[in-house]
Amino acid sequence: MIYRELGKTGLKVSEIGMGCEGFAEENCAMTKKLFDAAEAAGVNYFDLYTSNPKVRKAVGEALRGRREKFFAQSHICSVWKDGQYKRTRNLKEVVAGFEESLEQLQTDYIDVGTIHYCDALDDWKKIFSGGILDYVRELKSAGKIRHIGLSSHNPQAALAAVLSGAIEVLMFSVNPCYDLLPASEDVEELWNEKNYAGNLTNMDPDRQKLYETCQRLGVGVTVMKCFGGGDLLNAKLSPAGAALTPNQCIHYALSRPAVATVLAGAHSVEQLEQSIAYEDATDEEKDFALTFASFPKISWQGHCVYCSHCAPCVKKIDIASVTKFLHLAETQSTIPETVREHYALLAHHAGECIQCGVCETRCPFGVQIRENMKKAAKLFGY
């Protein structure tokens, strides 16, 4: 298992994490089975968005004797009321719900206390100034949570939260179909077939800016909906009109700036192990570029996805990394020091490009690589 830094939290998390979708299977008996499989494979991070008390208690039992082996990303503002899940911004409900969750989980702290489901700018404003964020900060000061997170599907709302400096971890929906959609405050738009009917082209700029800002500010991204609820694995259901493999979906998500872990949804041990198998997959099995280039409904033409099909460079330049650092730097008035340092550590730099164009003949997306190398050399100075 490969472990990545989760932003600036100091946590080293497994790049394959575990979603909680399958915890309720088999009357919650699946919970322990999934945690057993996760521990055996070195998975050390999981998400718990559900407020179902039965599921939370099952997780508490599954963690008994091994709490320190897992980082828990548990949601604040997700409560259980009248026998069903509810998202709330009512502070009394939020406080009671969080204290109840600690008891059910048999723990006295949560590693990443995640403010649940903020998809609207007005909602973020309420969280920021309406007492919720103050309460979450109190929880951190008291040691009841170690880090502050937020979950969102809307890049504009998420970016506002990231830029505020209030959150350390962002749980966000990342996959090659959703990434082409413009921001919306209605999560159902992610599944609306009409939104994919117009031959979408290239990543939505709000989403790209979000990922790059998270990278620059050290906000770790944990990925939900990597498989689009399973739709991306089925050619008939996929918005792209073609099926992807689990390895391709995971690799795409892990290739985005700031992403630390993919929270793989699994309804069985076999499904979890299929995601964990990514760690042993070949480069060919992970490669998504040629499949993207053949999508009948959406297009990434002209956009670098950091797939490295352009390699090898005759001057041994890591073209994908140079391009990624170029994109990270271009969004700022001055080059962030961390980006400059990472660029400097590359063995070869854009200024060494001899403009031969061989790389462009290999690119599945028609990216103007030589122009990008000129821009990078000018921007970084070498």
Image: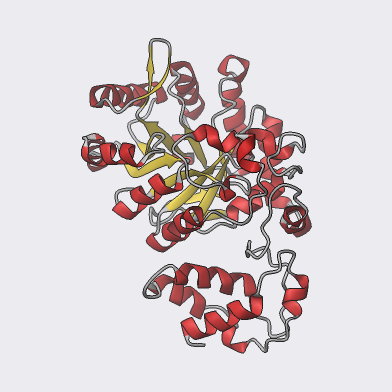
368 with respect to 87 (left or right): right
Counting the numbered discs, the total is 0
- Residue 106 visible in the picture: yes
- Return the residue found at the far top: 82
The x and y percentages for residue 148 are 34, 44
153 with respect to 270 (left or right): left
Between 56 and 195, the one nearer to me in the picture: 195
Query: At 39% across and 34% down in the image, what residue appears?
Result: 116
The x and y percentages for residue 17 are 56, 42
The x and y percentages for residue 321 are 58, 71
- Residue 349 visible in the picture: no
Between 232 and 181, the one nearer to me in the picture: 181
Query: At 64% across and 27% down in the image, what residue appears?
Result: 267
How has the structure been colored for display?
secondary structure
Is residue 62 depicted above or below 170 in this figure? Answer: above
246 with respect to 129 (left or right): right
Query: At 43% across and 46% down in the image, what residue appears?
Result: 170
Query: At 62% across and 33% down in the image, what residue appears?
Result: 229
The x and y percentages for residue 222 are 49, 46
Is residue 58 depicted above or below 319 in this figure? Answer: above
Between 217 and 22, the one nearer to me in the picture: 217
